[in-house]
Amino acid sequence: MTTFKNFIGGEWVEPSTGDYFENRNPADTTDLVGRFPRSGAEDVQRAVESAQRGFALWRRTPAPARGDVLRRVGDLMVRRKEEIADLMTREMGKPLNETRGDVQEGIDTAFYAATEGRRLFGHTVPSELRSKWAMSFRRPVGVCGIITPFNFPMAIPTWKMFPALLCGNACVFKPAEDVPHTGHVLVEILLEAGLPPEVIQLVHGFGETVGKSIVEHPDVPVISFTGSTETGRIVGETCGRMHKRLSLEMGGKNAQIVLDDADLDLALEGVLWGAFGTTGQRCTATSRLILQKGIHDRFLADLEKRASALRLGDGRKDGTDVGPLIHEASREKVESYVEIGQKEKADLVLGGERPSGKDLQNGHFFQPTIFAGVKAGSRLEQEEIFGPVLSVIRVDSADEAFRINNDVKYGLSSSLYTRDVNLAFRALETLDNGITYINAPTIGAEAHLPFGGVKQTGNGHREGGWEVYEFYSETKVGYLDYSGTLQRAQIDNYLGTPD
Ligand SMILES: NC(=O)C1=CN([C@@H]2O[C@H](COP(=O)(O)OP(=O)(O)OC[C@H]3O[C@@H](n4cnc5c(N)ncnc54)[C@H](OP(=O)(O)O)[C@@H]3O)[C@@H](O)[C@H]2O)C=CC1
Ligand SMILES: O=C(O)CCC(=O)C(=O)O
């Protein structure tokens, strides 16, 4: 069993508190992954001071050279992909094919960031005046606080840190306490790739202490947070009061809509993956399935059959389809929603219990669960559960489906299965989500397009794509006048006097 350290001030150090927490495998809690620092405010203070020094150096490193570091990061991740996937599954639970995908997302983000080092575009535009240049360009902002959730231990930190670093910022990184090992390896890789040590700080610990201290630190002008809407609201209040730049990526209640004309086999594959992949612990997970009346009964019967065949187990073992939930509190939350569903008189057609298998007793497993006859507006239909629970809603028409899709407080992802191209385009316009998939599940974002949602899913910023580079940089405008005169007259009269 290994005891891990923080990375602060350019070296691996013990926490000032002298305290550690245990990280255990959610598929088998007798398996101790390691002990990680339970850091305090003093560690954050040292990390921010060091990051400021790192920032002073890094901001002066040319952007293409910063991009080269990130390209090497991508190369190293390719080399260590299997190892990282394995350790991620051990600490987080999702099966190896999914953790490989998580690492791949980090690799894609690294290579995409590397190319941005040679773009990071500003604009050069014609000036209103003669002999004058007018342009905009991008500058870094400062020390960025990076606070991430447990469900994508590699992808989400890379979505945040790689663009932040490419833009010339320094980062103070606090991974979720449930997945500190993946965070540790990511920092190892950044250092091995040649990132100057003080540009990255890793402070392990709990949200209420380490996360809060980062958010409240006056010398951290940028916070990027992904997590629950409840925690995001707290973070947002502080950042608003302190006038910080903040990116929030929060909850979802995503729907897959299947219309009567859909390719049903395709839609079935989509919902199985969208609802039960990552044990439903994706912000983009399909937690509502909206079925049009003509195909409702047939589709539900097929879904029940397929979902009941999914194999729960240790994600590191061959043949496992669905891993455990991240911890006991998540399992209890899922159970509480099963109770809520029953009280709301929804029809429990599958699951709803802890599995009985002998080899599943040491993990936080829960059966894939399906409720049918769920009413629009009920708690089951409205609230984020973050577990393997799917609510099925029957509708008469596409318009009713669209209305129900939109009638929740979240707006991350949606999916429509239809063969009607006109309806597909109408859905793209009508559905109130940051991302809409046509004939594909609610999951599967790509690194070079903006990722994020509307309403209470976020605050208008996006991860990924070009948009994230705007978040991590300031636009500055430069004017250069070589006329040698103060061109006042031309301000009053654009035509000015002829040369
Ligand atoms: N829209 C999006 O892109 C995504 C959204 N999510 C959302 O994340 C949630 C699940 O992730 P989960 O990890 O449980 O989310 P949490 O909100 O519990 O935690 C997210 C991070 O915030 C930290 N934190 C907790 N309290 C505070 C605080 N007071 N101040 C600062 N930081 C704090 C946590 O620390 P600690 O280590 O103690 O947990 C963790 O690192 C779901 O709601 C899901 O929808 C997930 C992925 C993507
Ligand atoms: O499924 C995706 O597209 C990405 C999902 C994700 O990042 C998340 O759920 O946290």
Image (tube, rainbow, N blue to C red):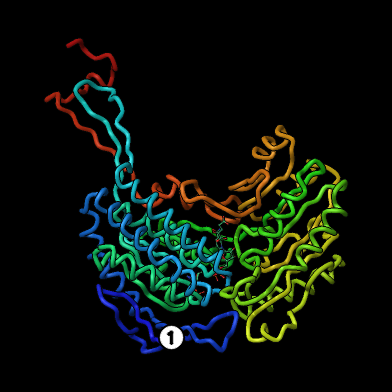
Q: The N terminus appears in which quarter of the rendering?
A: bottom left
Q: Position of residue 447 (x, y in %)?
A: 47, 51
Q: Quadrant of the C terminus?
A: top left
Of 63 and 104, nearer the camera is: 104
Q: Is residue 93 above or below residue 28?
A: above
Give SS at disc 1.
strand
Q: Residues within 10 Å of mark 1 (few under 14, many from 20)?
A: some
Residue beneath the point at 25% across and 70% down? 50
Above/below status of 88 relative to 165: below
Determine whether, in the image, residue 43 is placed left or right of residue 311: left
Name the residue furthest front.
318
Q: Is residue 343 left or right of residue 64?
A: right
Q: Nearer the viewer, residue 488 or 216?
A: 216
Badge 1 is on which residue? 35
Where in the figure is residue 13, as x and y percent of width and height? Answer: 30, 81
Residue 341 image position (x, y, % from top left) = 80, 68
Q: Position of residue 198 (x, y in %)?
A: 25, 68
Q: Which residue occupies the extreme left position in the image? A: 484
Residue at 45 percent of width and 75 percent of height: 180
Toward the viewer: 186 or 5? 186
Image-based side of 242 in relation to 451, left or right: left
CB of residue at label 1: within 8 Å of ligand 1?
Answer: no
Residue 356, quarter of the rendered image: bottom right
The residue lying furthest to the top in this view is 498
When the figure is inspected, residue 357 is found, relative to residue 75, above or below; the finding is below
User: So how many labels did they put on this image?
Assistant: 1
Type of amino acid under label 1:
Arg
Front residue of 45/51: it is: 51
Q: Compared to 216, does 121 lie above or below? A: above
